[in-house]
Image (spheres, rainbow, N blue to C red):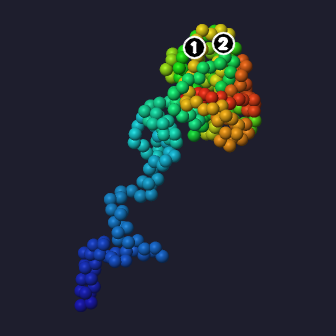
Amino acid sequence: MKKIFLISMIVCFALLSQAQLLAPKGIKSGSATLTVTEIGYLDGATSPVQTQLSAKLNKTDTISGPTFLYTKTQTDVKIQRDPNLTGLRLLGSRYIAQSFMLTAPGSNTLTLVSGTVYYVAVELKRDTTITGVAITQGVQGNFTADAENTISLCTIGTTTFDEVATTGTGNGSIWKNTADVTTYVPFTSPYVATKGMYMVALLYHASAQTTTPTLYTGANWSAASHSISAYGLTNNNRIVGTVATQTAIATNQTKSATSGMTGHPLVILY
């Protein structure tokens, strides 16, 4: 009789659903209890849940444009925190970074002065290889080039801007590009850069000129707004600045020797 009762109990338990077996307290392990509702969340899972979560894209992960659906493993191009640059890269652009704090890009132009070096701050938000600098002229230059016509990338030291990449010397064609067309000017060698602040230096030099070249800029600021004291800048740093009467971009430009300016040139790293 006892054997028949035991067999009957086993059959009854076998027929009960999982929910009936766990209800109402669920499964208890130590001080933690897994409820029936929580167990139900796992319904349909075909692989470890944490593995699936870890494969999702984080805010700081990378994407590869112009694809619009990404997983965490697609990491060849970092998402920029600048929404405009992010969108441009999704549409296939090569842009990596542009002039720091530039407002209303392309709203004004800057007439280049022969022999003046223009320094423009650029924030690089990720480690990457920079191929060169892209510029857009408002007016195509017509002039006789001499000395150096060049663009350089500089790191920002304690007291100097230090050249780390250049487009080469004597390239007067840099400032003779068709107006309103973005021109990509490559460095002599790509530069492997770490994220941080950089200065892009631009030099136009002519012995004679018929038409002076101009560059597109953002909204004009007062010279004082680019001064040493503006925005609480230290170590003689600037957002933009100039050094006059130069025939070449200095390899190590003393920051305290730069002056403020009203224009804010649009320069783009790619």
Q: Quadrant of residue 151?
A: top right
Q: Quadrant of residue 36?
A: bottom left
Element marked by disc 1: loop
**Residue lying furthest bottom in this view?**
1
Disc 2 crowd rating (10 Å Cα; few below 14, some 14-19, many 20+) is some
Q: CA distance from mark 2 to mark 1?
A: 10 Å
Q: Which residue sits at x=67%, y=34%? A: 224
**Residue nearest the observer in this picture, 40 or 17:** 40
Report the residue marked by disc 2: 206
In the rendered image, residue 80, in percent from the top left (x then y), is placed at 52, 40
Image quarter hosting the C terminus: top right
Residue type, numbered disc 2:
Ala
Q: Which residue sits at x=68%, y=43%? A: 232
Q: Which residue sits at x=43%, y=74%? A: 33
Indicate which disc, 2 or 1, sits on the residue closer to the N terminus.
1
Report the residue marked by disc 1: 141
**Circle count:** 2
Element marked by disc 2: strand
In the rendered image, residue 234, in percent from the top left (x then y), is placed at 71, 41
**Residue nearest the observer in this picture, 48 or 39:** 39
Q: Can the viewer see residue 1 in this picture?
A: yes
**Residue nearest the observer in this picture, 238 or 30:** 238
In the rendered image, residue 248, in percent from the top left (x then y), is placed at 71, 20
CB under 8 Å between callouts 2 and 1?
Answer: yes
Residue 87, label in figure: none
Disc 1 crowd rating (10 Å Cα; few below 14, some 14-19, many 20+) is many
Tell me if 194 is positioned left or right of 235 in this view.
left
Q: Can the viewer see residue 240 in this picture?
A: no
